[in-house]
Image (cartoon, grey):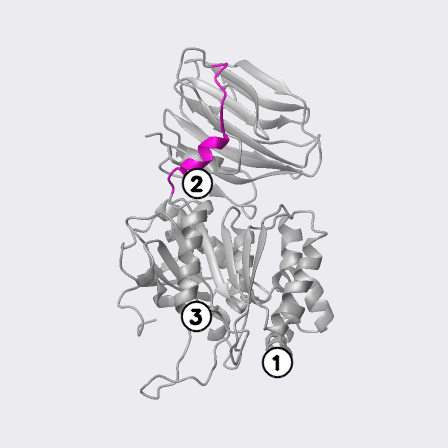
Amino acid sequence: MENLVDYIIKLNMDQIEDYKFPLDIPFGLEINYKNVKYCLIVRFSSKNKNLICCGPGAHARDERTSKGILKTPPFFHRWSWYKYFEESFIAYADPIFFYDDYIRLGWFVGDKKQWYLETLSIIIKKLSINQGIMHENILFYGSSGGGFTSVGLGTLIKGSKVLINNSQLNVMNYHETHVNNLFRILYDEFPNLSKKEIINLIDYRLDTIKLFNREKYMPPITYYVNILSQHDIYNHCIPFIKEICDLEYFENNFQINFYKEVKKRPHSSLSVTESIKIVKNFCKQHLYNNKYNYDIFNNLIEENDFLKNKNKYLVEENKLLNQMLYDYGKYVYFKSKFDTGSTKLNLLLPINYSLKFQLNKTKSKNCRGYIQIGINWNNSIFIGQISDEVFGIWLRKDGETMMKNSEIPLNKDNIIEYSYHDNIHIFKVNNKILYSNETTKYNYNKLLTIVEDENTFLTDLKIYTEYK
């Protein structure tokens, strides 16, 4: 990266969230995680809270500089595009090029010990937390192999958007030479396993449909494809469309833009000028810079029965709830599905705050998973499935409980929301208000803890910790 940027920062994974990164200048970022080196070129914006991430495609291994020097990894595509956007910008490189001299395209498949794309998603999440960037304001853009990783990252970072051009959607459907070169490495990583056995073991790393099923989620995807690229149409586009027809997690969030461009290699991406134009228009329409998109106010409803003479509490009924809440929040903490076990965040919530999380259960009963806000059992707020037979919200003070117990939801996944603002407690499940109460009684140490058992886990936790 030394030949691309002047400033390179080397960090461990646990240093990312709290590091003070420079603004408005490009820099290299190197993260070593479990003996694998991840390299990114980053430019954080001081003016914009959107983030554009660009992934790499294939790269020739015999390419040389203008001075005749052989180019060595890391290899970035579109790394200099930061200068075209006011948004924050990240270009990332596939670590596999460091560990093999012949591979030309790796799709971040990784090795036996580590799925490179999953680790990269954690890095990007931490960088987003550092900069206060919402997942909903992240765009993953790429073409060919970079499109494949964009779809994967959009799936792992829920709420983000995906924009791709002539992308692979199933590695096994790509050109045989590239696939065989990848499996040359995978055979060494998974000795004594056949090609079929390796595919079965890591199918979610090779096939976007398998990943959607694994994550129970499909991200919003906008797909540009050249109708003259027969390989893209018949090996990726058509098979993908056929499979999402039966996909449980498809929610009308897939748009295809066919175009016709005559060129020697119809698979190659649109021109830089046209691509940048498309990305800019997409950001303008679908990313919100952590500010209100005033068009959504047509979708707001007023729920003020419980407030009476106080200001009306506006609750957004569509998927942009996070955007609305974030306008009040300064710091957001995320707990992904890969963070397991009880977690004491040591986060002291301020006077007013909101939180939202997903309660995932393998059983409808006989399990527990909840958030505790407070110092002990007798002086805390409990939100979620508090015991085998109790679901709801408990507000406890000196051992006395004000509770709202509801029927245990039969759904496996339930969205739980709780807010405390101006002494008003609001508890919602799946966007329905189950409890609201105004009281000044429960003002005590707000240490937040997550409690889970083997049948329950909490994910996608967002905490909005400081109202403006």
Residue 113 in sight: yes
Q: Which mark is residue 61?
A: none
Image location (x, y in percent) of residue 59:
48, 77
In which quadrant is the N terminus drawn?
Answer: bottom left
Spatial separation of the CA atoms under disc 2 and disc 1: 43 Å
Near mark 3 (Cα within 10 A), the count class, few <14, some 14-19 or many ≥20, is: few
Residue ID for mark 2: 333
Q: In the figure, is residue 181 to the left or right of 306?
A: right
Circle 3 or circle 1, nearest the eye: 3
- Residue type at numbered disc 2: Tyr
Circles 3 and 1 in contact, beta carbons < 8 Å: no
Circles 2 and 1 in contact, beta carbons < 8 Å: no
The structure residue drawn at horizontal position 55% and vertical position 26%, both measured from the top left corner, is: 428
Compared to residue 24, the image places residue 133 above or below, namely: above
Q: Tell me where the magenta segment starts and ends, as one range.
A: 290-306
Residue 9 in sight: no
Q: Earlier in the sequence, mark 2 or mark 1?
A: 1
- Residue type at numbered disc 1: Thr
Which of the two residues, 42 or 254, is positioned nearer the viewer here? 254
Residue ID for mark 1: 177
Q: Earlier in the sequence, mark 3 or mark 1?
A: 1
Element on which disc 1 rests: helix
Residue ID for mark 3: 271
In which quadrant is the C terminus drawn?
Answer: top left
Compared to residue 189, the image places residue 296 above or below, namely: above
- Residue type at numbered disc 3: Ser
Q: Residue furthest top?
A: 309
Q: Earlier in the sequence, mark 2 or mark 3?
A: 3
